[in-house]
Amino acid sequence: MSAAGSSGGGDGQSPSASRARYVPWETLGVDLTLHIAQVFTDELSPFYDEADLAKVAASCAQVGNATFTGIAESIFTVLSPHFGEELSVTKNSTAADLKKVLKSWGRPQSGKKAELWERICDEVKANPGDDDEDDDEEEGDSEDEEAACGGKGGEGGKGKGASYRCPVARGVRQRIRELRNARITKSKAKEVYGLWPSTVKALPTEPRLVRSIGGMGRVETYAVADVKAAAIRRFKNYAGLMKDRQQSQAWKENYYGTKEDRTARCKAVLAARGVSEEDATRALQHVWHAPFLTDHSSAQLSGPEREAYLGAGALEVANMAHRWLFQSTHTPYRQHYGSLYRFHTFAKSGKFKQIDALERRALDLGLREWAHGQGSLEAALSHPSLPACLKAEVEAAWTKERAERPKRLEQIAALEERRRGIVQRVTAALARHEEPDTALRGQLQSLCYQLATLGARPVSLVPPGSYYDMGLEDGDDVDEDH
């Protein structure tokens, strides 16, 4: 006996082949056929809409197999659940009764009575020529209608003159056609499919006229088919998008809940120091970027250890807020920040870090100028509004200003002389009705920024309002929040 015969039970087949069981599609029961159809219909979502489902049903209907035809008809029933349904209303029924039917079907209820009746017929009848006595299919269906129904003809959509008919109402066919050709805007792609503008910008676009508050306007639109494909690559399926949104919502709730709780702790510290609710709110909004207000590191702590962490963090942020509140009220910090912001040349990236550095420099310059203006270190430290957390910084600022002030004034005088020279050249050129050298603007901005970093506050450059006027007068508003 051969090895194959001994191992395969004597019939020359391997054990795996002898155990294989192939069930013909024709022998599948009704329950299994319905289950297969339900696998497809349960996927209905923006990622897999009625047009996609109709395509599957059409493919099944064209197989020419009774089981696949049954699957197609089950899917068609989901697509057009009211097709062929006997109506409890007529075109002579009241508008209220017609709206009641449309509401139960989840269809729009606006419009005149004739429009309501037409909308009901669209869900029940196959073709515009159908009436209550004649449901024969009208010749000349569009290719889209044939595709939605699996083609015209006999079982599975094959054959001419056979009795198989399209079990999809004309309203459903119209919606399927619209879905296949639908286009959406960038904002809609974010709302429905969760795709950020940076993702959809690579997709092909087509300008369309849309109505807005100001009238008709042109916007770039994207094919829904392209957007769905990108969304499926990003989230795999609609359940993936829902999971991503749930996680995002949970993160937001945690973020804002944490921030609200810790902001309240900081306000309590400031209130104990006599700071009003309004001033505390304003100061804490300015230091919103403090890590303690939103970090989740305390989630792993408990008991006294967690309270110690929260207490220390609240004290640190309250001190930051109190320092800024004193500086913005009593020192020329705002003017220094305005000059630095106006004349700084920002890099394309990292603007927040650049603004943060400008503010730190402005706070340092403002505190040094205020301390020097008090006349003595003792007078500065005994100022009634000076918070205790700022006294060490005031002492350091006083010492630093006394040591560096003479040299700094010399540097300011040299830079100011150079600035005046460039301004004179610009003024003379304009007086001759000549266009000044464009490089002068860059030189002016650089000189003014250097002056601002040294504590000088360059004001308007002549001639005012011209291309070369880059001045910032005292009192001009500059956005300090960052």
Image (tube, rainbow, N blue to C red):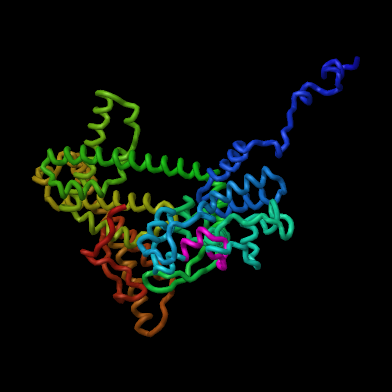
The x and y percentages for residue 122 are 51, 62
What residue do we see at 62% from left, 63% from top? 137
> Can residue 180 be seen in this snapshot?
yes
Q: Residue furthest right?
A: 1
Q: Is residue 307 above or below residue 408?
A: above
Residue 259 part of the magenta segment: no
Q: Is residue 300 above or below residue 62?
A: above
Magenta-tinted stretch: 118-131
Q: Nearer the viewer, residue 201 or 239?
A: 239
The x and y percentages for residue 282 are 20, 50
What residue do we see at 57% from left, 55% from top? 51
What residue do we see at 86% from left, 21% from top? 11
> Can residue 178 be seen in this snapshot?
no
Q: Is residue 113 above or below residue 380?
A: below
What residue do we see at 37% from left, 60% from top? 97
The x and y percentages for residue 109 are 39, 61
**Residue 7 location, quadrant:** top right
Q: Residue furthest front?
A: 133
The x and y percentages for residue 430 are 36, 81
Q: Nearer the viewer, residue 370 or 183?
A: 183
Q: Nearer the viewer, residue 471 or 177?
A: 177
